[in-house]
Image: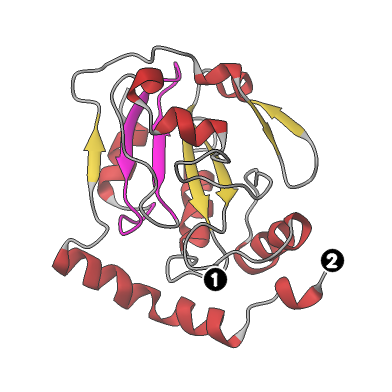
Amino acid sequence: MNHKHTVLSVRQRLLKFIYPLLMKLGKWTGMKAAVLSNRDEKKPLTSIYNRTVYLASGQQLPLEQFKGKKVLLVNTASDCGYTAQYEELQQLYERFPDRLNILAFPANDFKEQEKGDDASIEQFCKLNYGVSFPVAKKSSVIPGPSQHPVFHWLSNPAENGWCNKSPEWNFSKYLLNEEGVLINYFAPGVSPLDVSVIEAVNNG
């Protein structure tokens, strides 16, 4: 493991410092701040629980283990203006231990902002942000032949029933309910602790 990838670089410290300003700017301008909802309560046409995710640790995680709890699926990166959301995701995870699971999908799809290997990414999350929720192996989340099957499901109405929104940047967030129905998309500019996220997790 390369130690330099597990501690915050000068750039990462700067990004963490300006994160609150980035979020305020997003609220003022509406940039990357969309919230999409499954208002018609459309059911998926295929079950997401049929999929298994390979974790950074090498373990396999069958998504059927998440039945009965809400799940927030998030594409992440270590070198992004939104990377500080790891801390907020952990706070959300701790706030709803009996109601919510979170699963991070590191990806290098946007401006080369995730260059580390699986082991260093996992250590980076734990050491700098106290992350205790599962972190998947690095993959691609945007449309294409190498898109992770979970994100193909999340952005394909023929599978999830309604949503065609693929990740627009790092820290796009998709919320499933207790039965595996996709109920919300939250853009990167929506904090994991935003009232819209809290209400969606609390609902039902």
Image position of 155 with respect to 110: above or below = above
Q: Secondary structure at mark 2?
A: loop
Q: Between residues 77 and 13, which one lies in front from this camera angle? A: 77
Q: Dot 1: few (<14), some (14–19), or many (≥20) neighbours within 10 Å? A: many
First to last magenta residue range: 171-192
Disc 2 from disc 1: Cα separation: 18 Å
How far across and down, in percent of the image, does residue 132 sit? Answer: 65, 49
Identify the residue at image location x=70%, y=66%: 127
Q: Can you name the residue that lies furthest to the bottom here? A: 10
- Is 95 above or below relative to 15? above
Q: Which quadrant: the N terminus?
A: bottom right
| Quarter occupied by the C terminus | top left
Residue 58 figure quarter = top right
What x and y, as percent, mark residue 161? 32, 19
Name the N-terminal-most of marks 2 and 1: 2
Residue 51 located left or right of residue 190 = right
| Nearer-the-camera pick, 96 or 17 | 17
Instruction: Evaluate whether residue 195 shows in this view.
Output: yes
User: Residue 95 placed where, x, y %?
Assistant: 47, 45
Taking depth in this image into account, of 158 and 50 the one nearest to the observer is 158
Measured along the vertical axis of the image, is residue 108 above or below residue 61? below
Q: Is residue 72 left or right of residue 139?
A: left
Q: Is residue 184 magenta?
A: yes
Q: Residue 134 at what x, y percent from top left?
A: 65, 43
Indicate left or right for 192 with 111 as reference. Answer: left
Residue that mark 1 sits on: 79
Q: Which mark is drawn over residue 1?
A: 2
Give SS at disc 1.
loop
Q: As shown in the figure, which amino acid type bears the numbered disc 1? A: Asp
Determine the residue positioned at 30% across, 52% down: 194
- How crowded pointer 2 is (Cα within 10 Å; few <14, some 14-19, many 20+) is rated as few
